[in-house]
Image (cartoon, helix red, strand yellow):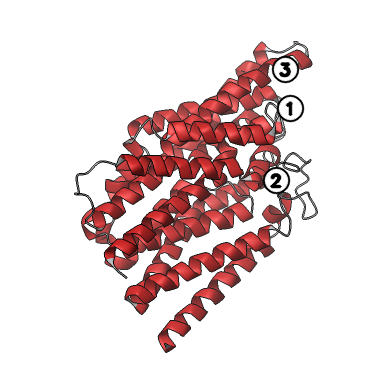
Amino acid sequence: MTETILLVLVVVTALAFDFTNGFHDTGNAMATSIATKALKPKTAVALSAVLNLVGAFLSLAVAATIAKGLVDADVITLPVVFAGLVGGIVWNLVTWLLGIPSSSSHALVGGVIGAVLAAVGTSGVLWSGVLSKVLVPAVLAPVIAIGVAAAGTWLVARLTRGLPQDATSRHFRWGQVGSASLVSLAHGTNDAQKSMGIILLALIAGGAVPADSGVPFWVIASCALAMAVGTYLGGWRVIRTLGKGLVEIDTRQGMSAETSSAAVILLSSHFGFSLSTTHVATGSILGSGVGMPGATVRWGVAGRMFAAWLLTLPAAGLVGALCHWLESGLGGTAGVLAVTFVLVAVSTTIWLISRRKPVDHTNVNDEWDGTAAAPAAAAPIADPEAFAAVAAAATTTTTATTKEKVHA
C-alpha cells in the first residue's frame, strides 16, 4: 500500500470518527430541548447540525492541542494514527449502542495514545500536555458544570416561584431554543477540531505538510460537514438517556443546563482545552436536578455514566494498541487491511444489534422506567448483553483475521 493511499484511508477514517462524534454528541445540545418539547426532535437535530457546521469555523485552538500537544509528531506514523482512530470509533459505537453519553473526545485521545504506546512506548506521549489539556479538564469540567447549573437553576426557580406554570414553561421554551443553539455552536468550536487535529497529524506524518503547518481549509470544511451530517442523523439513544434518564427536567432546568454547558465549553475552546463536551453537558443536566427543589436525580444512571467515563481513555487506548499490534504483526498492507476489516465488521455488528430495539425521533421521549422492558434506550443501559455481544464479535473477528493472515 503506497503512502498516498494510506494517507487517504487515514483521512477518510478521521472523517468517519467525526461523523460518529456528531451523532454521539447531538444529545449534549438538544436532549433537554427535546425532552421538554421546546423543539421537535427532527427540528432540534437539524438546527444542531447547522450550528455545529458554523461553529467548526470559529476556532482552531483545540485542533492545535490534538495535533501537537499530546503526542510527539516526530515519532508518529500513518499506521499509528489509523490504529488510534479505530480505537476511538469502536468505543464511540459501543457506548452509543448502550445509550451511554461517554466522551468522544477522550475516546479519540485514548485511541491515539494507546497506539503510540504500542508503537514507541512512553517516550512518544507528551504527558504534561495530556495532564494539563485532557485529564485536569476531564475532572474539573463536570464539577464546574454541576455547580454552575445548580446555582443557575436554583436562582431561576426562586425568581419564578409563584408564577403560573403554563406561563413560565411557554417562555422558557423560547429561551431553550436560544440556549440549545448556543451549545451546538460551542460544540462545533470544540469537538469538530479534534478530527482536524488528527488529520493534520496524519498529514505531517505522511509528509504532505511541514511540521509547523496550520490546518488547511479543506480539512476544516470536510470535518465540519462530516460532524454536521452525523449530528443531523441524531444519536437518539444518547439523547434519550440525557433527556429522560438522568433527571425529570422542565424548561427552567433545561435552559439553565444548556446555558451552563455553553459557557463552560466556549471558555475551554478559547484556551485550547480538549475537554469533553459530554462531561460538561451531563454535569449541567445533573446540576439542574440538584438545584431544582423537589427534582429527582437518577443517581444509578449517573453512576453507570461515571463508570464509562473512567473506562473511556483506557478502553479506547487498549483497542488502539491492539490494532497497532495487529498491523505490525502482519506487516505492511496486510496489517492495515486486517484492521480495516475489523473496524467494518465490528461497526456492522453494532449496527445490527441496535436494530433489535431501535430508538428514533418517534420514541425518544417515551417515559423512562429504567428496566429491561423500558422503551428503546433504557434496555441497552440496564442490560449488559448488548455489550457482551459486541465484545464477543470483536474478539472473534480479530482472532479469525489474524489467523487467516498468518496462515496466508
Q: Where is residue 203 in the image (x, y as percent from the top left)?
A: 28, 53
- At a point 80% along the width and 54% down the height, the residue shown is 373
Select label 2 or label 3 by which is in front. 2
Q: Return the residue at label 1.
A: 294
Q: Return the residue at label 3.
A: 170
In terms of depth relative to the viewer, which is nearer, 185 or 226? 226
Task: Say whether residue 110 is visible.
Answer: no
- The amino acid on which the numbered mark 2 sits, given as a three-letter code, is Asp
Q: What element carries label 2?
A: loop
Label 1, residues with CA under 10 Å away: few <14, some 14-19, many ≥20: few
Q: Return the residue at label 2.
A: 360
User: What whole-number distance in Å separates the C-alpha atoms at marks 2 and 3?
Assistant: 25 Å
Q: Position of residue 10 (x, y in %)?
A: 37, 58
Select label 2 or label 1 by which is in front. 2
Q: Considering the image in quadrants, where does the C terminus appear?
A: bottom left
Q: Considering the image in quadrants, where does the N terminus appear?
A: bottom left
In terms of depth relative to the viewer, which is nearer, 49 or 198? 49
Q: Which residue lies furthest to the bottom in this view?
A: 407
Question: As drawn, is 365 to the left or to the right of 390?
Answer: right
Label 3, residues with CA under 10 Å away: few <14, some 14-19, many ≥20: few
Instruction: Compare marks 1 and 3 and give the one earlier in the sequence.
Output: 3
